[in-house]
Image (cartoon, grey):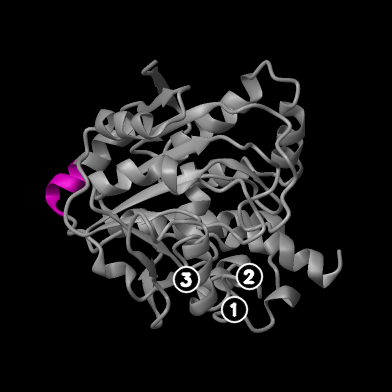
C-alpha cells in the first residue's frame, strides 16, 4: 500500500464527544446491574426524523444539561453521511451541539477553519451549533486497564459537556472493517493528535510520523476499544448510542469518493450499550436476505473487525449478548 492509500484508509478513522458526568454510587450500581442483565437494543426499520426521536424516547435516558451530539460531518466529496434533515428534529429536541474533532489526515477537515466550512457546506450549521472540540487544544482522559493505552487524547472542549449522544452512521470501514458506535466515540472524540495516538496503539502523541508508525491491526482495534472505554467511564450514565444503518457502503464517511452501497438500508438502532449496538448492526447485516451483503461482510471480516467487539467486551465496555426489541 502506498502512503496515499494509507492516508485515505486512515482517514476513515478520523471521524470526530461526554460531559464531565459525576460518577455517583447510583451510576456504579447501574453499571453493575447492566453487567448481570442482557443489554437491550431497540430497532425500527423506518428511517425518518420521527423514528430517531421514537428510539431516543424508548431508551428512557433523557439528555440533560449541555448536550454533545457526536456525528461525522462527512468529508467533502462524500455523500453517505447522515443528512441534517434526518437528525434535525432530534438535535433540536435535545438542544444539542454537534461536536467533532479535526482529522489526522490532510483532507478538508484537517484544520479547524476547513472543518467548519465543511460542516456548513453539508448543512449542519443550519440546524445546530457546531463545535470543533480540539480547535483550542486537547486534554487527556485516563484509560483504566488498557493493554496499549494509558490515556485517551480528546478535544479540550469535550469536558464542558454534561451529556453525550453517540449518533453514528453504521457502514463499512477501510481499516476497522466497520464503523459504528465504538469507532465514533473513540476515534471520533479523539483530537487530531489523539487519533494518531489510537492509530499507533499509544506510540505517538502527534500526527507527525503517523503513517510510518501505524499499529498492527489487532493492536489498533484494541486501542479503539480502550479509547471508547475512556469515554464511557468519563460519562457514567450520561451517554446514549443511536446508529443509523443506511447507505451501507464498504467505505466510511471520511472517504471523499466512497463506493456506492451494494445492499439496501436496514434501519435505526439504539442502546445504552455500545458493544451490543454494534453487534446488533453487524448481525442484521449477516442475517439479511440481500445478496449485496456479502460485499460489506467481506470488508468487516477481512479487517478482523469483530475483534473490536470481542476485546471491548473483555475490558468491560459492553456485552455482545443482547435482546433486540423491534418498535415497528
Q: Residues within 10 Å of mark 2 (few under 14, many from 20)?
A: many
Question: Residue 299's x, y, as percent?
Answer: 74, 41
Please identify the dominant SS of the magenta region: helix
Is disc 3 in contact with disc 1, using a CB cutoff of under 8 Å? no
Q: Which mark is residue 204?
A: 1
The answer to which quarter of the image holds residue 76 is bottom right
Q: Position of residue 129 (x, y in %)?
A: 32, 63
Q: Secondary structure at mark 3?
A: helix
**Residue 28 part of the magenta segment:** yes
- Kindly check if marks 1 and 2 are in contact, taking CB atoms under 8 A apart as contact: yes
Q: CA distance from mark 1 to mark 2?
A: 6 Å
- Residue at mark 3: 116
Q: Position of residue 7 (x, y in %)?
A: 73, 68
The residue at which mark 2 appears reads as: 200
Circle nearer the N terminus (3, 2): 3
Q: Compare residues 245 and 256 and report the one nearer the observer.
A: 256
How far apart are labels 3 and 1 at the CA level? 26 Å
- As drawn, 205 above or below 235: below
Range drawn in magenta: 24-29
Quadrant assignment for the N terminus: bottom right
State the SS at label 1. Answer: loop
Does residue 205 sit above or below 178 in this rendering?
Answer: below
Amino acid at each position: 500500500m502506498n502512503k496515499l492509500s494509507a492516508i485515505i484508509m486512515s482517514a476513515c478513522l478520523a471521524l470526530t464527544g461526554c460531559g464531565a458526568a459525576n460518577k455517583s454510587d447510583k451510576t456504579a450500581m447501574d453499571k453493575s446491574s447492566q453487567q448481570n442483565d442482557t443489554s437491550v437494543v431497540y430497532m425500527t426499520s423506518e428511517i425518518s426524523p420521527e423514528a430517531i426521536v421514537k428510539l431516543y424516547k424508548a431508551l428512557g435516558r433523557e439528555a440533560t444539561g449541555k448536550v454533545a451530539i457526536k456525528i461525522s460531518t462527512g468529508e467533502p466529496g462524500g455523500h453517505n453521511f447522515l443528512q441534517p434533515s434526518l437528525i434535525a428534529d432530534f438535535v433540536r429536541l435535545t438542544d444539542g451541539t454537534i461536536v467533532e474533532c479535526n482529522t489526522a489526515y490532510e483532507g478538508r477537515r484537517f484544520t479547524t477553519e476547513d472543518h467548519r466550512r465543511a460542516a456548513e457546506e453539508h448543512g449542519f450549521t443550519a440546524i445546530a451549533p457546531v463545535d470543533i472540540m480540539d480547535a483550542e487544544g486537547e486534554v487527556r482522559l485516563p484509560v483504566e486497564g488498557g493493554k496499549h493505552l494509558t490515556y485517551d487524547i480528546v478535544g479540550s472542549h469535550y469536558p464542558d459537556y454534561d451529556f453525550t449522544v453517540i449518533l453514528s452512521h453504521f457502514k463499512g470501514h477501510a481499516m476497522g472493517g466497520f464503523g459504528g458506535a465504538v469507532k465514533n466515540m473513540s476515534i471520533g472524540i479523539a483530537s487530531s493528535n489523539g487519533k494518531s495516538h489510537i492509530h499507533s496503539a499509544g506510540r505517538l502523541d502527534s500526527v507527525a510520523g503517523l503513517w510510518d508508525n501505524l499499529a498492527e491491526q489487532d493492536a489498533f482495534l484494541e486501542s479503539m476499544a480502550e479509547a471508547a472505554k475512556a469515554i464511557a467511564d468519563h460519562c457514567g450514565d450520561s451517554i446514549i448510542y443511536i446508529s443509523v444503518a443506511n447507505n451501507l457502503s464498504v467505505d466510511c464517511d471520511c472517504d471523499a469518493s466512497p463506493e456506492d452501497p451494494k445492499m439496501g438500508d436496514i434501519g435505526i438502532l439504539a442502546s445504552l450499550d455500545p458493544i451490543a449496538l454494534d453487534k446488533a448492526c453487524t448481525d442484521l447485516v449477516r442475517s439479511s436476505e440481500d445478496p449485496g451483503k456479502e460485499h460489506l461482510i467481506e470488508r468487516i471480516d477481512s479487517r478482523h473487525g469483530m475483534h473490536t467487539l470481542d476485546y471491548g467486551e473483555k475490558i468491560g465496555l459492553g456485552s455482545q449478548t443482547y435482546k433486540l426489541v423491534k418498535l415497528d
